[in-house]
Image (cartoon, rainbow, N blue to C red):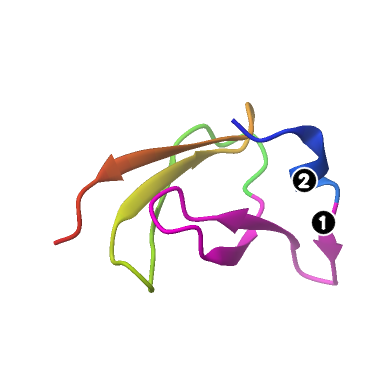
Amino acid sequence: MFDDDTFNEFMINEQFIAADVPCPWCGMVFELNVEDGQTDVEYQCSNCSHCFSMNWVSRQVQKTSDAP
C-alpha cells in the first residue's frame, strides 16, 4: 500500500487523470490513467514483463504473476 503522498501528484488534462505508480516487481514508475472506482485493474510492466493489479479505491498495488 502506498501512502497518500504517492498519489498527491495527479496530472489532469482534458481527457484523463493520471498518477505515477511504481511496478511492485522492479520499481519502474509508470504514468497510469486513474480508473476511478475500479478495484482490480491489471497492468504489465514493460521493463520486467511482470503483471500487477491496481486497486484505485484502496490505492493498493499487488503483484499478480511472474514474468512470462
Q: Is residue 39 magenta?
A: no
In the displayed structure image, the side of residue 40 where residue 35 appears, left or right: right
Residue 7 numbered tag: 2
Q: Nearer the viewer, residue 11 or 48?
A: 48
Label 1 CA crowd tier, 10 Å (few <14, some 14–19, many 20+):
some
Q: Which residue is mark 1?
A: 10
Secondary structure beneath label 2: helix
Q: Position of residue 30 (x, y in %)?
A: 58, 66
In the displayed structure image, the side of residue 14 where residue 47 appears, left or right: left
User: At 67% across and 41% down in the image, what residue appears?
Assistant: 36
Q: Is residue 27 magenta?
A: yes
Could you say which quadrant of the image residue 38 lies in? top right
User: At 56% across and 55% down in the image, what residue appears?
Assistant: 22
Label 2 CA crowd tier, 10 Å (few <14, some 14–19, many 20+):
some
Q: Nearer the viewer, residue 22 or 36?
A: 22
Q: How many marks?
A: 2
Q: Position of residue 6 (x, y in %)?
A: 75, 45
Q: Amino acid at mark 2?
A: Phe
Asked if 30 appears above or below 52 in the picture, the reply is below
Could you say which quadrant of the image residue 2 lies in? top right
Assign the N terminus to one quadrant of the image.
top right
Q: Amino acid at mark 1?
A: Phe
**CB under 8 Å between callouts 2 and 1?**
yes
Secondary structure beneath label 1: loop
- Give the extent of the magenta segment: 9-34
Q: Residue furthest front?
A: 26
